[in-house]
Amino acid sequence: MVKQHVFSWQTDFAGALAASHDLGFLILSWIVASISGFCALNLMHFLKSEQHKAHSSFKWLGGVVLGIGIWATHFIGMLAYSLPIPAGFNLLLTLLSAMPTAMGAWFALYLCHGLASTYFTSGKYSHIYTPMISALSLTVGMGVMHIIGMYGYSVAAVIYTHLGGLIIAFSVSMFFAFLAFYTVFNRSHTLLSLPSAWREGISALLFGLSIVSLHYIAMHSVTIVPSNLFTSEGMTSDSLLHILVVVTCLLLVVFTLVVFFSRRTLMLSSMANDTLALIVDTMENMSDPIVLCDKNGQVRLLNQAYLTHILDQADASNHIGASIETLNAYILPKIALPEETTDYGGFLAQLKKGERCQVKTGDSRWWLLRQRATPSGFIVQIWTNITEQIDTQVMLINARNSMYESVSRLEEVEAELLETKKLASIGTLVTSVAHELNTPIGVAITSLSAIDGQIDEMKNLVNNGSVNRQELVSIFISLKEFEQMALRNVRRAAEMIDQFKYITAEKHTAQAHAFNLSAMLKDKMPLFINLIGHAGIQFKVDIDNDIILVNYEEVLFQVIKILLTNSIEHGLKYQPVGNITLSCLEEGQYVTLVYQDDGKGLDPAIADNIFDAFTTTKRAEGKVGLGLHIAHNFVRNKLNGTISLDKSCNTGTRFYIRLPKDIRHG
């Protein structure tokens, strides 16, 4: 069986056809190859930047663009290849031939991006190995594409391919590809220190030479011998031309986009560099010591303040490029840690978490140390001088301690004064009690003395035998009068002593309990009416039926009883009619009882001292002045409330009694 495609070392074949190349298509193929190379190389440079290292879609896009460009170059070259016999192109093989070159281009970008460098190109000569392996990958892809494309080339002839020429084409193409990739990987090389536009243009032309050299040298190695055993099939040259026109337009669009984004990236890169320089200058001029590390935790900057206050200038070179952990391990043993920190390991763990730490350096300066990671992954360590704040804090602590001592001394003095005041109050109370008891007891003693005198006089009359009825009647009348006077004053003294017992609120020992305020007052109403004893005086209770108090019911009754007694004996004593009202206001967890009469009111002279013991305007009538004082003690000390006089009341007298609804929580 005769094969149509034969690989041979032979060069001379009888009946071989003479082929020619169209110069226009040849130039066009180089232009297309250069454009695709320009796009691919710029995309490679774009991918090599760190901010795009995770964008695998760009690598696939670059592989497709470069593969299609090489494929288009090959078939434009096939259109430039002219034979005296008809030729066709197998559509399936023509399209399939684009796959190996796209795969080769993708793998070259993969290597260029550095993802595979640890496997293939690590080592001392990686700047040579990487472009070499990338060029090999791309050239293999182009070679496979060329062979598949030739198998899709359909003519009525046998196609002989010279292996030597194919090897030469492969080698030349790989050489130019290596040069193109080398310019990408070694932009800082002194031999390539050209302006960016020149370097990119030369790289693209070298890439175009790599593509067209493989095709045209390989086609020069092809010999075509007519044969009746084969026929021309597939697409015509015109159909292929239409496809290539579309592909070329797409490449031009991609070229335009690449140029735009390249310039845009260059501008942004320049702005980023300017911003970085500004940040570095700012950090250098800051008064706070600063350490700046890259994403890997390696120290990149120690500003001047850090070298002045924290680290010696001579040690700086040993730590630039070292890890932040190494720098911390070197610095921290030389500083005083916070009191609550027991070891350096725990302190470093706190610092790594971003917690603020206070440390003290050997020059007695205090620093607030913070170590934070920026959103972009850089690590910044800042030392802020807080020596003045610490000194101020120490002064405040000393002042606070001094204040506490002063307060303690004041409390002792206050306790002494309170004790003195208590003794003075007791003395005043004893004096007042003695004064109040002195009159009735004195009158009783005088009466008893008079009775004793009358008895002695009656004894003398009896002994003398001169007693008569008239004298005895006179003596008995005097005895009765003195006895009544003594009895009245003794009873008065007994009443005073009974009232004195209520000066404190400790007499009532009953337990607090819940009771309905309105119901309690209604139950006690007969007692209140009996106490009033005056038909013209009305006592009205205006309190809601649902008010419940937890307190001392009997004590509250005694307070209201004292107020009623005060109104009857003072405000309403000489009035034929009068009104007394008791109402209640709710205020959250408290109630306020409002007691008011429409009597003559209080004497303004005693209004300020109305709750003091022995305050009365009717001492001449035998009043002691303990009622409101006892009520005040009951309300404050037993009911846990307050009682006050409304001095602004123009009609009668008004008292406010404020009590908790529940004495357990009041």
Image (cartoon, rainbow, N blue to C red):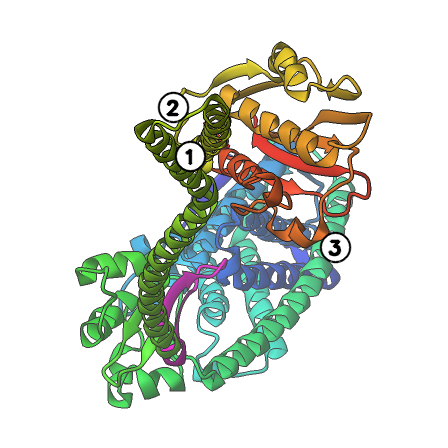
In the rendering, which numbered label is found on residue 509? 2
Q: Is residue 360 visible?
A: yes
Of mark 2 and mark 3, the one earlier in the sequence is: 3
The answer to whether 526 is drawn above or below residue 339 in the figure is above
Q: Magenta includes 564?
A: no
Q: Residues within 10 Å of mark 3 (few under 14, many from 20)?
A: few
| Residue 594 location (% of width, % of height) | 70, 31
Q: What secondary structure is found at the residue carrying circle 3?
A: helix
Q: For the residue marked with disc 2, what is the amino acid?
A: Thr
Of mark 3 and mark 1, the one earlier in the sequence is: 3
Q: Residues within 10 Å of mark 1 (few under 14, many from 20)?
A: some
Q: For the residue marked with disc 1, what is the amino acid?
A: Ile
Q: Which residues are magenta?
A: 368-389
Task: Return the residue at label 1.
Answer: 497
| Foreground disc of the pair 3, 1 | 1
| Residue 103 location (% of width, % of height) | 50, 45
**Residue drawn where x is 59% and y is 25% of the image:** 561
Q: In this rendered view, identify the residue nearer to me: 561 or 181.
A: 561
| Residue 552 location (% of width, % of height) | 48, 23
Left or right of 331 on screen, residue 117:
right
Q: Residues within 10 Å of mark 2 (few under 14, many from 20)?
A: few
Q: For the residue marked with disc 3, what is the amino acid?
A: Val
